[in-house]
Amino acid sequence: MDSRTTHRAEDDHYERIGRVLNDFRERHARGESVSEQVLFAAHPDIADELRENLALLGDLAFMGDGIRHLVQSGTLRRGTGPVAAALGSYQIERIIGRGGMGIVLEAEEPALERRVAVKILRPEYAADPSARRRFEVEAKAAAAVRHPNIVAVHAVGEERGVPYVAMEYVPGTNLAEFIRAHGPL
């Protein structure tokens, strides 16, 4: 096979993946009951690539539209005025980061007139007792530590079925960005 034939075959392969993903997402957007498992079973030869692409698309959509998604899912309640959303007394302004189990939000705590970081358990784990327990253990461990280089925990609680930890907000870059810019510690 010459290189043109190889490139054409690769292009056809990726075009097929694109068509299948677009069809799946369009059906989902129309409100049809579509299952990723049925999608993968219908296309077993490209199932792994479909799975990877759907995960990537989900991450991109979440980061780009995260606050609205959290409001629509019922995790956060809709904010008033310029505030995007709220969780209990915290006025959520933006997503700071996202990890394997949690989402960290920048928020204002009006009663004490201070900026805080609020870590919540990701919605897909909120009903999982094991995930909730790990989140609780992490929160208690963080609250027990007192050190000038570790953020202080202000509160631990649950609102709308969502466990959260409110902690000191430290402006600046995250650790991963710092290491990329300055090298290992």
Image: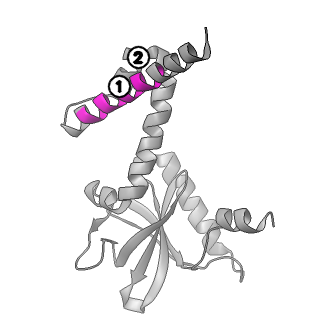
Q: Give above or below for 17 relative to 148.
A: above
In front of the other: 54 or 11: 11
Q: Which residue is depicted at the point 80% across and 63% down?
A: 184
Provide the secondary structure element on which disc 2 rests: loop
From the viewer's perspective, is 9 left or right of 110? right
Query: Marks 1/2: CA distance?
Result: 9 Å
Q: Which residue is depicted at the point 55% across and 17% down?
A: 4
Q: Which residue is depicted at the point 65% across and 74% down?
A: 144
Quadrant of image for the C terminus: bottom right
Q: Position of residue 179 (x, y in %)?
A: 73, 64
> Magenta segment: does it hold 24?
yes
Identified by mark 1, the residue type is: Val
In front of the other: 100 or 127: 100
Q: Outermost residue, right direction?
A: 185
Q: Where is residue 119 in the image (x, y as percent from the top left)?
A: 49, 66
Which residues are the magenta region? 13-26
In front of the other: 104 or 14: 14
Q: Give above or below for 89 relative to 61.
A: below
Q: Give above or below for 35 relative to 171.
A: above
From the viewer's perspective, is 2 left or right of 53? right
Q: Which residue is depicted at the point 37% across and 89% down?
A: 111
Q: Does residue 123 appear anywhere in the picture?
A: no
Q: Position of residue 101 (x, y in %)?
A: 52, 52
Q: Where is residue 148 in the image (x, y as percent from the top left)?
A: 71, 83
Identified by mark 2, the residue type is: His
Quadrant of image for the N terminus: top right
Residue at numbered disc 2:
43
In front of the other: 10 or 172: 10
Residue 20 marker = 1
Magenta-colored segment: predominant secondary structure: helix
Q: Do the residues bearing badges 1 and 2 touch, measured as CB atoms within 8 Å?
A: yes
